[in-house]
Image (tube, grey):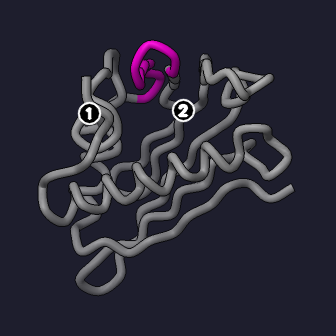
């Protein structure tokens, strides 16, 4: 099965994208954030209200090039989902590539495949937060989940 993947161009620099993925997550993903996302082996938890959370471990950081997170804990407590912990054990890979006056960001969510129950819901979420990240990088203002 094919993992969820999304590649997009952004008018920014590799160092700004790397900073957004390591130290500025609350500015584009969710304001309900705790922990450490800027160092290898750091652990951080993001919440989206009372019923959805993700706890990630930073597996690899290559400055201005790659960020890898492993999902240690996850809950998507939505009534229609039978398996509300599907993100657990998945891996999120961000790759940054420079291209003239912009960068290409490649997101691959290893383990998020069409066979996963939350696939449509989760890919809709990714599209929203990718759009927020792109806006944050280009304008300084993202559209994160708010408290």
Q: Is residue 94 above or below residue 13?
A: above
Which sits in the foreground, 57 or 114? Answer: 114
Residue farthest along the top direction in this orientation: 50
83 left or right, relative to 38: right
Badge nearest the viewer, 1 or 2: 1
Name the residue: 12% across, 55% down: 140
Q: Which label was assigned to residue 59? A: 2
Q: Secondary structure at mark 1?
A: helix
Residue 59 at x, y percent in the picture: 54, 32
Q: Which residue is mark 1?
A: 26
Does label 1 or label 2 sit earlier along the sequence? 1
Q: Is 114 on the left or on the right of 60, as rendered?
A: right
What range of the chain is rendered magenta? 40-52
Quarter holding residue 130: bottom left
| Residue sticking out furthest to the left | 140
Q: In front: 92, or 84?
A: 84
**Percent x, y of residue 123:** 60, 51
Image quarter in which the N terminus is found: bottom right
Badge 1: few (under 14), some or many (20 or more) residues near its Cα, within 10 Å?
A: some
- The answer to whether residue 44 shows anywhere in this view is no
Q: Can you give x and y, in whole percent of width and height, for residue 121 in the image?
A: 62, 44
């Amino acid at each position: 099965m094919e993992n969820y993947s999304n590649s997009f161009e952004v008018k920014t620099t590799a160092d700004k994208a790397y900073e957004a993925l390591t130290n500025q997550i609350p500015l584009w993903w969710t304001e309900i954030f705790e922990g450490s996302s800027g160092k290898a082996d750091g652990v951080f938890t993001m919440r989206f209200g009372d019923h959805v959370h993700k706890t990630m471990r930073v597996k690899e950081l290559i400055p201005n090039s790659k960020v890898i997170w492993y999902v240690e804990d996850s809950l998507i407590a939505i009534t229609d989902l039978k398996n509300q912990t599907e993100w657990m054990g998945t891996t999120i890979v961000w790759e940054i590539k420079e291209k003239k006056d912009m960068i290409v960001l490649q997101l691959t969510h290893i383990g998020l495949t069409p066979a996963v129950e939350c696939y449509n819901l989760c890919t809709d979420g990714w599209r929203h937060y990718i759009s927020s990240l792109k806006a944050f990088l280009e304008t300084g203002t993202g559209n994160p989940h708010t408290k």
